[in-house]
Image (cartoon, rainbow, N blue to C red):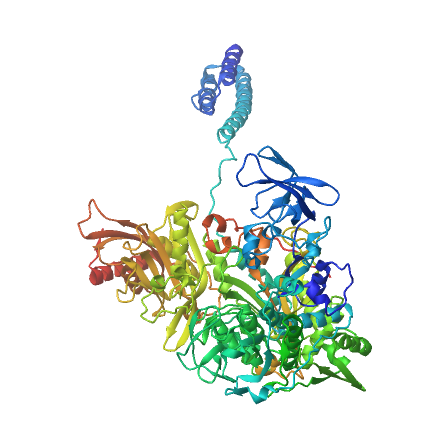
């Protein structure tokens, strides 16, 4: 009997070893250990045995069953592992294939610059205000100390609609609007980004362009305040090493007036073809608000003083993104637009 | 204004070797920018030579072979000029010389050695307008006293430098050599020299034979001086050279003197041939339509706003702009009347803008000093006596309402430092005024500054502050931030939020032109207002303001289409314009244009109406208008250039805020969709604050139904019916399938809806839900003749 049990066990172990499939393994389990399994059958037929042999054979068979069970278990684990690694291998993918994603839109470079300027000035307590693009002669010129027939009107050839209405040539028009709208005549701190228009169109000028105007009206405002403010502004936009140079100039709405040059952003001041070897780039117009402008718009020039500045944003955007032709900004070729699809890198200001 | 440095040196002493660039830069730092600065003649290696021999070139019918003595050697030079001949003193460009036309090299010309070039005046780079006939025809012939081996440019007096200034509109005083001398003198602290006005006058009095009359308020001073027996000839070289350096063509001594004195003093003059006048000059306004032939031979038709000079009978000159042909100085002129006057700057500006700009009008426009009106007459007499053998008639005929006195302005050091933000001492301030040539008197803190009339730009304290800043310099001011109350700045946040939302939807932001062609200005609108057109456009394709933003996006689409960019999904927040009665208005719009392929989630999809509708809904939902808007096929309101079957008005709270749909196939053959929302109108509609809504603890139950309805029944009608019938238990209903064709009758369609039911307080029973669904079906059957599938 013992031989028989051992032989069955050996067959079982052989079969288990040979199998490479979990299903087959289960069949083997049933075949040997199941209710009608070969080892189980021996137990069932034990009635034929003597009472002395029965416990002996019983323990023999049970031991064999346990052993087979253990081997099956081991095999099962082995096979499961094998199967998993096979599955993993099958599921191996080429992760370099293109991803599936939604598309990112893009923000126009000029609006990126406008937002950066707005964020800076808002953080310094300025309000961002706007005004009409189709402006009256009164606000665009007369209230800025530029009466009709004034020779400085030559400086800006304008698009008139009628003798009274025109496309604004400068965001400065909003200076007068802001002062007039402030009926309490309290201090003012605003910037005005927006579209402006002049009658010229060539490789370096667009008839439509963008400016940002700044106006501060308060007590004891001086040129030092203007300079400090523009220093922060320009360092934010062009980098910490940017320096400013004030050149006296003439604008009818400021007195004294200054054109402000900044360190050439291409060569850093060493001299190159962009700055015509001077190391400086003319970028801003600025000055102390003319007393006539304060007076005409309801502020007492004996109590208040102010500064104003204006800067062309197209040039800043062109510098920031290395755009070489102003016309690209307005052609809106989608191949151009789509390039502006990520977050901006900005300069930090150190004090 | 072109400034001749030689001319300037007549009135202010400059260091002999000062570089013209240095003057130009120092002037720039004082507020006077320049375009160009350099030598009048840009040539190197020029020398005076003498032609020793001149023979015909053996292989040419026009070239000559010359032997030219240049001082230290005799050169063989081949020359093609017809006037080259033995004994001539000439300008020789040696080998290596750089001329505006290129570098001169040694060479062989048709077998003959040539070691330089004999030059014409043209080859030295003078502008064409300064060239005489002989300058164009051949080489320049120098006078016999020219010394061989010396510098010909110096010999001719053309060794001058020129700065071309781009002056600011307020500095009319710098349109004169004297003005420039005061400015340069202030910068370098040099005194300005006196101008020579000396001359003799005969014992006649002009007033005995000549009258001036001024019959308009637009002339403040009018002076006439009589000069007899002038001899018309060529001007001396220095006058001609300075005129050329200043950009004015020399003509003859008398005409040149009038220009020369204008350059010196800034006062434009007009010289009349006295024998063509009839004893008087009158200033008056022109009659409407009055005709006048100006010096350039062109007949001008005048307006009432033009000031004219008349001989008592008719206009003979356009005041301040140009003289008349009839009374001009000619070769035969013997006697002259000099006119020196000041006309109203605004009137001159208008006339010159309308008719013609001239050196004279440019100066009148910017304003003049009446002291110079007198000075210019005296200076003319001085020069005419010297260079035209003139006899000056005594006295002047005059009309004068001007004041010649200085303007006094009181100022303190505190005033100046408060604005400049500096600490300049009273002494330093007084020194600046001294350098500018302004007299001062001091009473305690108050400085009274006497500003001479030549500085017409200075009238108030602030002007003087600018002068101090200009001359003292402001670049060492220490910048600071204004010391003002801190507060929070504000900006238009919602525009940015909309912009960012549109970008997140995968659209590309544009920045388009507001000017479009007149014919297209009202595209994608149904307004019948007058177009808003420019008076003087730059071009016909940008002559009118857009009435919609979409039209500008459509132009961008066309630009991209021409470049084969097929997928265009763009948007912009911008303004459109309108004329209402006599008033103009502008509206802030959100516009979008979509065509080609678009990413919808992770899948690319061809843009159709529903895609752009999705964009519109995304924006409206994002802004909080969920449930308050609808798309309405209002045939009356949909613009005619849009597809009538695939377009709609966007209604929020029953107010039309925008338009959406496909561009009419008659206009655009491709499938292009646009969206335009009036943001002013939309954002005017208040939205409540975002609030948390309790999430139900009880399970949601979904039921699907499919119905067949008539083709004409819209999805919106079905949804409204479902919502009404569903009551409060129905939380959501969504279309998930639309089917037409096999199994469905012609003219019918099948729609499948997924309905969600829920209650905040309890789990719904099957019975309740079935009842609700039944009620919905019943309503659909009754109201829309729907059949359950």
Instruction: Name the residue at 70% across, 81% down.
Output: B451
- Quadrant position of residue A305: bottom right
Quick one: A59 or B540, which is closer to the camera? B540
- Quadrant position of residue A125: bottom right
Percent position (x, y) of residue B545?
A: 41, 66
Answer left or right for B788 relative to B552. left
Answer left or right for B148 relative to A110. right
Percent position (x, y) of residue B411?
A: 73, 83
Q: How many marks?
A: 0
Percent position (x, y) of residue B6?
A: 70, 63
Q: Is residue A62 visible?
A: yes
Q: Which residue is the extreme one toward the top?
A: A3
Percent position (x, y) of residue B428?
A: 80, 75
Q: Is residue A126 visible?
A: no
- Quadrant position of residue A236: bottom right
Instruction: Name the residue at 48% across, 80% down.
Output: B308
Instruction: Name the residue at 54% across, 76% down.
Output: B272
- Quarter of the figure with the N terminus of chain B: bottom right
Quick one: B294 or A103, which is closer to the camera? B294
Quick one: A276 or B518, which is closer to the camera? A276
Answer left or right for B651 relative to B405. left
**In the image, is residue B772 above or below residue B225?**
above
**In the image, is residue B445 above or below residue B561?**
below
């Amino acid at each position: 009997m013992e031989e028989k049990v051992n032989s069955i066990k050996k067959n079982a172990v052989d079969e288990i070893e040979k199998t490479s499939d979990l299903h087959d393994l289960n069949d083997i389990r049933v075949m040997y250990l199941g209710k009608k399994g070969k080892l189980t059958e021996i137990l069932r037929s034990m009635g034929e045995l003597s009472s002395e042999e029965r416990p002996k054979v019983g323990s023999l068979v049970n031991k064999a069953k346990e052993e087979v069970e253990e081997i099956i278990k081991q095999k099962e684990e082995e096979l499961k592992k094998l199967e998993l690694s096979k599955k993993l291998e099958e599921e191996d993918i080429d992760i370099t294939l293109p991803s599936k994603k939604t598309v990112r839109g893009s923000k126009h470079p000029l609006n990126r610059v406008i937002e950066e300027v707005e964020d800076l000035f808002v953080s310094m307590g300025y309000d961002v205000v706007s005004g009409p693009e189709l402006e009256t002669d009164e606000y665009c010129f007369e209230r800025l100390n530029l009466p009709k027939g004034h020779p400085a009107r030559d400086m800006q050839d304008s698009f008139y609609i009628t003798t009274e209405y025109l496309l604004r040539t400068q965001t400065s028009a909003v200076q007068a609007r802001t002062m007039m709208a402030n009926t309490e005549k309290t201090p003012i701190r605003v910037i005005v980004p927006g579209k402006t228009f002049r009658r010229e169109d060539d490789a370096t000028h667009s008839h439509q362009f963008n400016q940002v105007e700044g106006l501060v009206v308060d007590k004891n405002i001086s040129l030092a305040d203007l300079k400090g403010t523009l220093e922060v502004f320009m360092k934010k936009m062009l980098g910490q090493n940017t320096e400013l140079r004030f050149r006296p100039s003439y604008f009818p709405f400021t007195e004294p007036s200054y054109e402000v040059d900044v360190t050439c952003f291409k060569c850093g001041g060493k001299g190159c073809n962009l700055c015509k070897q001077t190391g400086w780039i003319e970028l801003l117009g600025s000055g102390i608000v003319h007393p006539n402008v304060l007076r005409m718009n309801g502020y007492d020039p004996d109590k208040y003083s102010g500064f104003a500045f204006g800067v062309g944003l197209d040039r800043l955007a062109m510098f920031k993104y290395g755009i070489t032709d102003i016309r690209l900004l307005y052609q809106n070729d989608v191949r151009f637009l789509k390039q502006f699809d990520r977050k901006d890198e900005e300069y930090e200001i150190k004090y | 204004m072109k400034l001749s440095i030689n001319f300037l040196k007549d009135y202010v002493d400059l260091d002999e070797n000062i570089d013209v660039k240095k003057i130009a830069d120092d002037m720039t730092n004082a507020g006077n920018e320049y375009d160009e600065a350099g030598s009048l003649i840009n040539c190197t290696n020029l020398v005076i030579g003498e032609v020793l021999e001149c023979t015909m070139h053996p292989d040419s019918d026009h070239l000559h072979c010359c032997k030219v003595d240049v001082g230290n050697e005799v050169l063989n030079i081949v020359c093609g000029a017809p006037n080259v001949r033995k004994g001539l003193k000439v300008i020789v460009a040696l080998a290596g010389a750089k001329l505006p036309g290129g570098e001169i090299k040694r060479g062989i010309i048709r077998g003959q050695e040539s070691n330089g070039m004999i030059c014409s005046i043209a080859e030295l780079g003078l502008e064409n307008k300064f060239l005489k006939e002989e300058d164009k025809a051949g080489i320049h012939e120098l006078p016999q006293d020219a010394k061989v081996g010396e510098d010909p440019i110096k010999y001719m007096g053309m060794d001058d430098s020129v700065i071309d200034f781009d002056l600011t509109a307020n500095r009319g005083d710098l349109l004169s050599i004297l003005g420039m001398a005061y400015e340069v003198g202030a910068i370098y602290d040099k005194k300005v020299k006196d101008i020579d006005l000396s001359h003799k006058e005969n014992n006649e009095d002009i007033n005995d034979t000549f009258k001036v009359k001024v019959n308009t308020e637009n002339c403040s001073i009018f002076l006439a001086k009589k000069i007899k027996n002038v001899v018309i000839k060529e001007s001396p070289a220095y006058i001609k050279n300075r005129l050329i350096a200043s950009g004015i063509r020399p003509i003859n001594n008398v005409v040149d003197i009038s220009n020369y004195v204008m350059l010196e003093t800034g006062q434009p003059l007009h010289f009349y041939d006295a024998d063509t006048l009839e004893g008087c000059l009158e200033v008056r306004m022109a009659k409407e339509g009055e005709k006048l032939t100006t010096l350039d031979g062109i007949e001008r038709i005048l307006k009432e706003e033009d000031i004219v000079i008349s001989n008592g009978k008719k206009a003979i000159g356009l005041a301040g702009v140009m003289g008349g042909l009839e009374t001009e100085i000619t070769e035969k002129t013997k006697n002259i009347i000099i006119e020196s006057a000041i006309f109203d700057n605004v009137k001159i500006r208008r006339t010159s803008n309308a008719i013609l700009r001239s050196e004279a009008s440019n100066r009148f426009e910017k304003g003049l000093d009446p002291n110079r009106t007198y000075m210019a007459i005296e200076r003319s007499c001085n020069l005419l006596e010297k260079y035209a053998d003139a006899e000056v008639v005594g006295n002047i005929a005059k009309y004068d309402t001007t004041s010649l006195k200085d303007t006094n302005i009181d100022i303190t050091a505190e005033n100046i430092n408060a604005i400049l933000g500096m600490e300049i001492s009273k002494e330093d301030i007084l020194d600046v005024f001294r350098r500018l040539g302004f007299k001062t008197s001091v009473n305690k803190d108050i400085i009274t500054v006497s500003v001479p009339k030549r500085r017409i730009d200075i009238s108030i304290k602030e002007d003087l502050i600018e002068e101090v800043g200009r001359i003292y310099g402001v670049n060492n001011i220490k910048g600071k931030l204004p010391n003002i109350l801190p507060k929070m700045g504000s900006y238009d946040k919602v525009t940015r939020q909309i912009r960012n939302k549109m970008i997140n939807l995968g659209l590309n932001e544009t920045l388009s032109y507001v000017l479009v062609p007149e014919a297209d200005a009202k595209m994608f609108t149904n307004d019948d207002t007058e177009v808003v057109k420019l008076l003087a456009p730059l071009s016909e394709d940008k002559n009118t303001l857009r009435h919609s933003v979409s039209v500008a996006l459509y132009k961008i689409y066309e630009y991209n289409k021409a470049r084969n960019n097929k997928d265009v999904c763009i948007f912009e927040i911008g303004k459109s314009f309108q004329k209402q009665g006599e008033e103009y208005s502008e509206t802030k719009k959100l516009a979008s244009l979509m065509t080609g392929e678009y990413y919808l989630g992770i899948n690319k999809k061809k843009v159709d109406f529903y895609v752009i509708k999705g964009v519109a809904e995304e924006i409206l939902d994002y802004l909080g208008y969920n449930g308050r808007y609808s798309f309405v096929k209002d045939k009356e309101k949909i613009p005619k250039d849009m597809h009538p079957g695939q377009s709609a008005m966007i209604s929020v709270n029953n107010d039309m805020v925008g338009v959406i749909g496909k561009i009419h196939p008659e206009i655009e053959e491709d499938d292009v969709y646009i969206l335009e929302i009036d943001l002013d109108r939309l954002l005017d509609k208040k939205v409540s604050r975002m609030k948390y809504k309790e999430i139900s603890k009880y399970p949601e139950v979904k039921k699907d139904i499919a119905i067949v309805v008539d083709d004409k029944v819209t999805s919106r009608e079905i949804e409204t019916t479902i919502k009404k019938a569903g009551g409060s238990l129905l939380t959501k209903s969504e279309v998930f399938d639309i089917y037409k064709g096999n199994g469905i009758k012609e003219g019918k369609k099948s729609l499948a809806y997924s309905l969600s039911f829920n209650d905040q307080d309890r789990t719904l029973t099957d019975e309740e839900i079935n009842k609700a669904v039944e009620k919905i079906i019943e309503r659909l059957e009754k109201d829309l003749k729907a059949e359950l599938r």
